[in-house]
């Protein structure tokens, strides 16, 4: 299988004056095309740090990270911006929608600047929000807002979708809807998807689960059978 | 409380750039207040000290020839405490080094040698001895301009007799604090001076033995000036007296007083503008700070701090900003004030300057500045008291947006989402957007309201110097003469054309309203000096009646067709009735005009002229000067080319300084407004903008959202500023206009353009400064927190 992400000895050190915090201590990892990966681990184990480096939001202190042939760790800020614009979709715990734009416009924000996007309506339909197209974020529930954020992330047909605790702020029923949207996109568009979660139940819907502790990968598990989102309970 | 104060210091430190931007605007207001009050008081104080110590007279009058024993009768008028009678005349001087003739006002000293009133203040040398006939004291500025020392001599033509006079000293007088030659528009220290000399030599030169032609008096404390003036006039009329006048019409006092009035007006009108803008900025910045600190405020309340303690905390922050501005304003004000006060002594000649630097100036301006900051803080501070601890602890409800008409417009035009964000931000907070725009408009208006002066003066100069007065030289005749004198003048060297006119001092009345004016009699053929209408074409005066300036028409409440009473105050006095046959606009002075033949017929005289306008062959000007210096019947000379040059030079000089100062002040306003607006927009949108960066928007695309709003507001604000500026200019023109001159209201395209460009540049620069912070947005941190 072809890998979309490949890392070699990624280390991240936060220098906070007196103490040095080691967020990552040498991570070697491959994420394969089309797969859905779940990152599991205790709070502070370095999951978000890794995801941010892969997404071009943050820089490693040492080591190399590649997106296909692109060496992310060698790129300047300007190149990273273009990389994010063209290849990556992000979904965060706190949605981060623009409050002054409607659902459709939030999605259009991205489709307007990408080379090969879908129509905003199409993206919103994929997450089941075709009826709430002209609503502002303040008029949507948390789950709906998160689904708009997903529609916004996938509308440009990114190769990778990086999700940091996408269900963290949601109850289980709405959480399931969000996970359904992610699974559907992974299947229909073949988008490689990385999901960070604290919720061990969610690991059952992944192709592969990567366990994190103290800045290192401690274990990798391949699921032979995957559960559908509505079969997951928490 | 300790912790609270630490927070205060940190808040202040964190807000330093925004505080500075506000403090600079506030400092402008404080500075102008300090300067205006300080300079005005200093000049007033110096003026009254000089008037008192050197016994400046209260009432002035002149006559043709009044016997010296009339003085005793004048002293009998009740209310008169001191009377001084003198001879005053004009003389043409031949000075080495300058070819063109200078003119001097001659003032006699009493036989005792010591004047009782209007006492010259010797600045060098000594007074002439009473028996010396060729010794004189000259005014200091004239001596300085011509490099004269006590002991130097020069020639003067007194009533046709050339005399060599020797300077024994130099002096300054309360009568000539502002010294301007007859017919001149600018002081010219080199070519116009005052000469004090003994009574006897003057009386014999001008055939005034045993007589005087000028009287000044000081009143007792309880005197009624009007009654004294009326009594004095009655005594002087048989001797060709003119109407007595008080200090308010004395030329030097009038100029100084109008300057002081302007300073007072400036102190009252300009600083409040800055205080209002500062208050608005404090309101904006504190409002944002408090909404960011809702949760902290809730916490403070929950742990038991009182509303008062919390309010006081934020008020202290405002006071801090206010104090910052006030101290800055004081610091600049105190040095600039002294500099400006000394600058005034270039035009106003005092022997000394009493610089008043009283504490209350600082108290007033300081209180005003701090009050502005505190008032600005009030709205937001009151909001903190309304927050209940529980509400304050939960995050504010998300801002609700609604689709509106502007959105439809945006969609129709296919606007991209960043543009939609700008549109929604403006329409969601229209009040804030309008206030920001208004701040920018006010800065544009400030520039226009100050810089339009140069445009107006241009129009004035073009009209007064190039269209109306095309003669190079005006000669005034010692006595009115028949038109035959024009042929004599044309025979002087270099003269190409000579045109005569007649000026008669008269009192024009309509019912109980009256004014003293010079009535000009003009020939229809006059082409050098012309009176123009609004469209710059020459007015030919009707064969009958009087044409008056619009200002005079207002004073007299007269319209075309009204009949005025004209009381001639010179020579053969008499009272006549004339109809108003026209009303014209006039920039300099209030005037009245008649056809020369009509005027002569009215006065039952042969047509006479007492001023001759001359066009000359410029290459032969020196010859003309030497002819004029020895011509007995020419009493004065006005050189228009020099007036033009002097005027342009003065304007050009003050133009660059004024333009720089006002551009700086206006830029400070723009920076204060735009910088703070941008910081607040950035603070409110940091999260949103960081999300866009994560989505792959470049730095400049993100900056556009921030700057786009402000630049859009700037572009809207500039034309509004043009309109406000034009309206302010109109107010200024009407408040400036006096009987001395009327300023035309004219704002050139260049001024509009300049003000627009300065405001736009300052605005863009401040927005850019803030948008550099977009680069420093921490993308990772933003994602971790809930708003
Ligand atoms: N800006 C920072 N400065 C200093 N230390 C930091 C910073 N950001 C993260 N860290 C530290 O790096 C480590 C890894 O953080 P990271 O956010 O990657 O953890 P995480 O696995 O995502 O945790 P969680 O599940 O709670 O989100 C933590 O110990 C954290 O304290
Ligand atoms: Mg995390």
Image (spheres, rainbow, N blue to C red):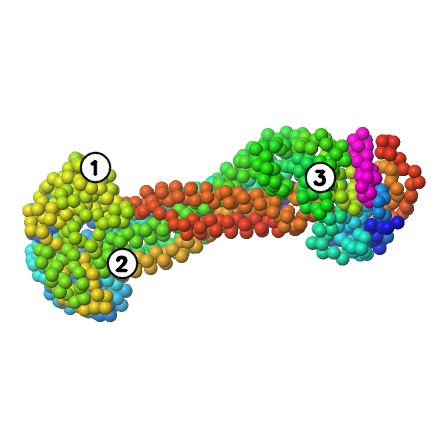
Residue B154 colored magenta? Answer: no
Circles 2 and 3 in contact, beta carbons < 8 Å? no
- Relative to A157, is A61 above or below? below
The answer to which of A166 and B314 lies nearer the viewer is: A166
Q: CA distance from mark 2 to mark 3?
A: 75 Å
In the displayed structure image, the side of residue B598 where residue A94 appears, left or right:
right
Residue at the disc numbered 2:
B643
Disc assigned to residue A119: 3
Quadrant in the picture for the C terminus of chain B: top right
The x and y percentages for residue A130 are: 72, 32
Residue B338 in which image quadrant: bottom left
Between the C-alphas of marks 2 and 1, the distance is 34 Å
Same chain for the residues at labels 2 and 1, yes or no?
A: yes
Residue tagged by mark 1? B559
Region of the chain picked out in magenta, as a range: A168-196
Label 2 marks a residue whose chain is: B
Q: SS of the residue at dot 2? A: helix
Q: How many marks?
A: 3
Q: Is residue B128 visible?
A: no
């Amino acid at each position: 299988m072809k890998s979309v992400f490949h890392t070699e000895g990624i280390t991240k050190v936060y220098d906070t004056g007196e103490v040095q915090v080691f967020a990552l201590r040498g991570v070697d990892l491959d994420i394969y095309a089309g797969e859905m990966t779940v990152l599991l681990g205790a709070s502070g184990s370095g999951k978000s740090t890794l995801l941010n480096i892969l997404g071009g939001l943050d820089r490693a202190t040492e080591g190399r990270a590649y997106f296909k042939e692109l060496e992310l760790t060698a790129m300047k800020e300007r190149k990273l911006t273009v990389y994010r614009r063209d290849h990556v979709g992000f979904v965060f715990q706190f949605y981060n929608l623009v409050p002054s734009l409607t659902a459709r416009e939030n999605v259009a924000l991205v489709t307007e600047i990408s080379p090969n996007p879908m129509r905003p309506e199409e993206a919103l339909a994929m997450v089941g929000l075709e009826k709430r197209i002209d609503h502002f974020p303040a008029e949507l529930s948390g789950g709906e807002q998160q689904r708009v954020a997903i529609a916004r992330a996938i509308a440009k047909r990114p190769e990778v979708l990086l999700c940091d605790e996408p269900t963290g702020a949601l109850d289980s029923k709405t959480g399931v809807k969000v996970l359904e949207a992610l699974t559907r996109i992974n299947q229909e568009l073949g988008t490689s998807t990385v999901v960070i979660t604290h919720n061990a139940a969610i690991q059952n819907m992944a192709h592969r689960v990567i366990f994190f502790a103290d800045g290192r990968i401690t274990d990798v598990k391949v699921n032979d059978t995957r559960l559908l989102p509505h079969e997951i309970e928490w | 409380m300790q912790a609270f104060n630490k927070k205060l210091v940190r808040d202040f430190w964190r807000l330093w750039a925004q505080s500075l931007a506000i403090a600079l605007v506030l400092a402008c207001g404080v500075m102008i207040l300090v300067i205006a009050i300080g300079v005005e008081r200093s000049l007033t104080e110096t003026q009254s000290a000089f008037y008192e110590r050197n016994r400046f007279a209260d009432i002035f009058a002149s006559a043709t020839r009044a016997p010296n024993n009339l003085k005793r009768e004048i002293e009998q008028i009740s209310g008169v405490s001191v009377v001084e009678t003198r001879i005053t005349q004009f003389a043409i001087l031949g000075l080495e080094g300058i070819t063109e003739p200078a003119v001097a006002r001659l003032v006699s000293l009493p036989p005792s040698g010591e004047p009782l009133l209007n006492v010259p203040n010797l600045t060098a040398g000594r007074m002439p001895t009473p028996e010396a006939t060729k010794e004189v004291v000259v005014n200091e500025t004239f001596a300085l301009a011509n490099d004269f020392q006590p002991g130097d001599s020069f020639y003067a033509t007194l009533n046709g007799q050339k005399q060599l006079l020797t300077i024994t000293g130099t002096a300054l007088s309360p009568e000539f604090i502002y010294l301007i030659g007859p017919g001149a528009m600018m002081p010219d220290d080199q070519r116009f001076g005052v000469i004090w000399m003994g009574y006897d030599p003057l009386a014999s030169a001008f055939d005034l033995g045993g007589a005087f032609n000028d009287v000044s008096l000081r009143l007792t404390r309880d005197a009624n000036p009007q009654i004294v003036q009326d009594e004095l006039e009655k005594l002087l009329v048989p001797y060709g007296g003119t109407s007595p006048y008080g200090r308010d019409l004395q030329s030097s006092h009038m100029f100084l007083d109008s300057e002081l009035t302007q300073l007072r007006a400036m102190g009252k009108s300009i600083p409040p503008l800055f205080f209002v803008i500062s208050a608005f900025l404090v309101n904006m910045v504190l409002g944002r700070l408090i909404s960011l600190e809702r949760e902290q405020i809730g916490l403070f309340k929950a742990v038991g701090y009182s509303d008062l303690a919390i309010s006081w905390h934020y008020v202290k922050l405002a006071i801090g900003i206010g104090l910052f501005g006030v101290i800055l304003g004081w610091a600049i004000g105190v040095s600039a004030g002294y500099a400006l006060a000394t600058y005034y002594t270039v035009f106003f000649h005092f022997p000394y300057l009493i610089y008043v630097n009283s504490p209350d100036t600082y108290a007033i301006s300081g209180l005003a500045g701090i009050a502005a900051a505190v008032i600005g803080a009030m709205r937001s501070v009151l909001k903190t008291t309304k927050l209940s601890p529980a509400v304050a602890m939960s995050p504010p409800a998300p801002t609700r947006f609604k689709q509106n008409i502007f959105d439809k417009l945006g969609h129709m035009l296919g606007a991209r989402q960043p543009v939609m964000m700008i549109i929604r931000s403006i329409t969601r907070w229209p009040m804030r957007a309008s206030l920001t725009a208004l701040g920018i408009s006010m800065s544009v208006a400030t520039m226009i309201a100050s810089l339009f002066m140069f445009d107006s003066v241009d129009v004035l100069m073009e009209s007064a110097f190039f269209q109306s007065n095309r003669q190079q030289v005006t000669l005034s005749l010692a006595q009115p003469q028949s038109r035959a004198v024009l042929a004599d003048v044309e025979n002087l060297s270099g003269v190409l054309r000579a045109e005569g006119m007649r000026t008669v001092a008269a009192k024009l009345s309509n019912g109980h309203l009256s004014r003293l004016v010079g009535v000009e009699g003009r020939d229809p053929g006059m082409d050098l000096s012309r009176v123009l209408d609004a469209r710059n074409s020459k007015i030919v005066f009707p064969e009958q009646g009087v044409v008056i300036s619009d200002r005079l028409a207002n004073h007299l409440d007269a319209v075309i067709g009204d009949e005025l009473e004209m009381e001639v105050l010179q020579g053969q006095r008499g009272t006549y009735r004339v109809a108003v046959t026209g009303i014209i606009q006039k920039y300099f002075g209030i005037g009245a005009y008649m056809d020369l033949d009509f005027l002569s017929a009215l006065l039952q005289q042969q047509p006479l002229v007492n001023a001759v306008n001359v066009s000359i062959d410029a290459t032969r000007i020196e010859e003309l000067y030497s002819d004029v210096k020895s011509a007995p019947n020419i009493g004065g000379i006005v050189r228009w080319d020099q007036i033009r040059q002097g005027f342009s030079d003065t304007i050009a000089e003050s133009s660059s300084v004024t333009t720089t100062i006002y551009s700086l002040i206006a830029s400070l306003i723009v920076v204060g407004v735009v910088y703070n607006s941008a910081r607040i927009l950035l603070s409110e949108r940091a999260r949103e903008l960081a999300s866009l960066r994560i989505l792959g928007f470049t730095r400049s695309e993100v900056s556009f959202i921030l700057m786009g709003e402000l630049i859009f507001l700037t572009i809207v604000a500039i034309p509004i500023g043009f309109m406000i500026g034009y309206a302010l200019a109109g107010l200024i023109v009407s408040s400036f206009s006096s009987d001395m001159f009327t300023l035309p209201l004219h704002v050139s395209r260049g001024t509009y353009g300049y003000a627009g460009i300065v405001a736009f540049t300052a605005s863009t620069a401040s927005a850019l400064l803030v948008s550099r912070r977009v680069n420093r947005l921490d993308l990772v941190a933003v994602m971790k927190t809930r708003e």
